[in-house]
Amino acid sequence: MSMPRNAIRLGLGVREGPQTEFEAAAQSYQDEYGWTVGVYRTGVWLVSGREIDALDMPRKLGERARTALGDSVPLFESPDDHGVRWVFLVVSHAGPPLPEVAEQGVDHVGAGRCVDLPPSRFGLHRLRWITEPGGVEVPDFTTVTHATLQSR
């Protein structure tokens, strides 16, 4: 059975009609990267802990880590009313939490949690890619945490 044009294939059933910006982004993440994603009214989320986790950190620390890593890692910014945080996507890490990373204000978003992805919106704030995942490899957890610790 072929799917209708403009059908949504998110594992949530198929419906005909145009996709919202968020449905289109989620479909792209699923089709291009094989990520387990979901959609809500104003955004897209990724289920962490299966293949991908996230390291969410203060912008200044993220900038220093990115300098050490270069432009070769998927990275987006997540603004809110209190400032901007940078979020690096990494290969899932099942090991114990690293207190030295948490002390720097880094949140390891691992198994059992979800990560909002661009182009999600929260009021006036919109997540945006700094380095899109296309054409770059998702680094392992240790690579990014090491760069974070070295850039203090």
Image: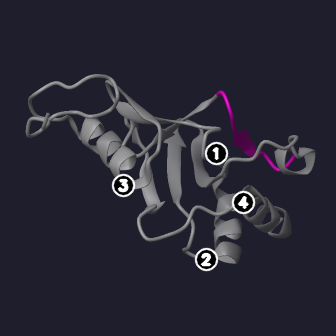
Label 3, residues with CA under 10 Å away: few <14, some 14-19, many ≥20: few
Q: Looking at numbered disc 2 in the image, what kind of residue is underneath it?
A: Gly
Q: In this view, does 90 lie above or below 70?
A: above
Q: How far apart are marks 4 and 2 (CA)?
A: 14 Å
Label 1, residues with CA under 10 Å away: few <14, some 14-19, many ≥20: many
Give the residue number, with chain letter if any, for mark 3.
32
Q: What element carries label 3?
A: helix
Question: Closer to the camera: disc 3 or disc 1?
Answer: 3
Which SS type dominates the magenta stretch? loop
Q: Looking at the picture, how far across and down is residue 56, in whole percent? A: 65, 46
Is residue 58 magenta-colored? no
Instruction: Specify start and end residues of the magenta stretch as a single range.
Output: 103-112
Q: Which mark is residue 70?
A: 2
Give the residue number, with chain letter if any, for mark 4.
61
Q: Which mark is residue 53?
A: 1
Q: How far apart are marks 3 and 1 (CA)?
A: 17 Å
Question: To which quarter of the image does residue 5 belong?
Answer: top left
Q: How far apart are marks 3 and 2 (CA)?
A: 23 Å
